Image (cartoon, rainbow, N blue to C red):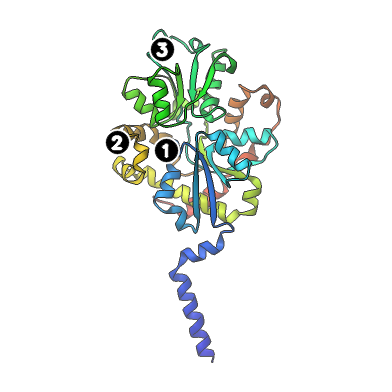
Amino acid sequence: MRRRTLIARSAALSALLAAPSLVRAQAVEKPKVSIAVGGKNLLYYLPLTIAEQLGYFKAEGLEVTVVDFAGGARALQAVVGGSADVVSGAFEHTVNMQHKGQAMRAFALQGRAPQIVLGINPKTMSGYKTVADLKGKKIGVTAPGSSTNVMVNFILAKAGLKPSDVSIIGVGASQGAVAAMRSGQIDAISNLDPVITLLQRSGDLTIVSDTRIVSEAEKVFGGPMPAGCFYAPQSFIDKNPNTTQALANALVRANKWIQAAGPGDIIKAVPESYLLGDRAVYVDAFLAAKGALSPDGLFPDAGATTAFKALASIDPEIAKATLDLKAVYTNDFAKKANLKYPKA
């Protein structure tokens, strides 16, 4: 009898060892997770796409549904409204939401620089000299209130202009944004790759500020400015620590894969629709953005302060606020993910 029991236990143990994904699936509190993102095709969110396309979420025992919106502000609204669990979006939203009394915490970084480019339309602004010339002009952003809009406001403020001095128009993050510039519907644009590289190559964009370059981003914002990341309500993280860890594991693994990948690897991994009909443009965009992508998912310690200062410069209410900036991010999950995936 004992022998039969031992055999049965041995068989059960062997089955578990042979199916590690089953063990992981039982460990996560919420195996089905929805992630809201604003402009999934952007290089800004490449780590999210790689984690999804290469099966890294599944390897962590997760069934992830990615819901795409026109901009980061709308992705945030989806989580606030309860129709999504986690945001793949801009870091500064966590600071802004704390100011609004809603605890959001970032737990895995995708980009160590915003990768947002502000450029003018050479057709409608042929006489452009300084940022002050944007007064009274139409500026396209992915969506009003998104990080592309924040970048515009920040650069305007440094030039002595208010957000009300320009007209902000949501143009999305794909072909619509390209068409708006080429048709002259907007005089300037704040957007990301591959949109920026496509416009630049066709001569429809003159760059004013380029935060795809980490050093330039730090000059613009006065310090390290974390960009795309995974963030969620603190209540979600508290209730689902193992699920949060699984998400961080998948993202950090994707970050490391990207750093070791060449343009050909990226082209094979991303959906054809992301290429905007031109593989060469996407390759150029990837090479331009690669240095701004996080290699390890970790947030810089000064990042939250930089984000706060940027928001404070355009919002007097935030400037007067006393916030707990340590509560808007954590490196605990990314550190554990790096231990699990020390290499690509």
Q: In the shown orientation, is residue 89 left or right of residue 326?
A: left
Name which residue lies at 47% across and 30% down: 172
Residue 61 pos. (x, y %)? 49, 59
Q: Identify residue type, mark 1.
A: Asn
Dot 2 falls on a residue whose secondary structure is helix
Dot 3 falls on a residue whose secondary structure is loop
Query: Which numbered disc flags the more N-terminal residue, 3 or 2?
Result: 3
Q: Image quadrant of residue 212?
A: top left
Dot 1 falls on a residue whose secondary structure is loop
Q: Quadrant of the N terminus?
A: bottom right
Which residue in the structure is indicated by mark 3? 124
Name which residue lies at 43% across and 52% down: 342
Contact check, label 3 and label 2, Cβ < 8 Å: no
Kindly report the distance in space between the C-alpha atoms of the residues bearing marks 3 and 1.
28 Å
Question: Between residues 304 and 273, which one lies in front from this camera angle?
Answer: 273
Residue 279, disc: 2
Q: Identify residue type, mark 2.
A: Arg
Q: Identify residue type, mark 3.
A: Thr
Kindly report the distance in space between the C-alpha atoms of the residues bearing marks 1 and 2.
13 Å
Q: Is residue 94 above or below residue 218?
A: below
Residue 93 pos. (x, y %)? 59, 34
Residue 190, disc: none
Name which residue lies at 45% across and 18% down: 186
Q: Residues within 10 Å of mark 1 (few under 14, many from 20)?
A: many
Q: In the shown orientation, is residue 341 left or right of residue 1?
A: left
Residue 41, disc: 1
Query: Which numbered disc flags the more N-terminal residue, 3 or 1?
Result: 1
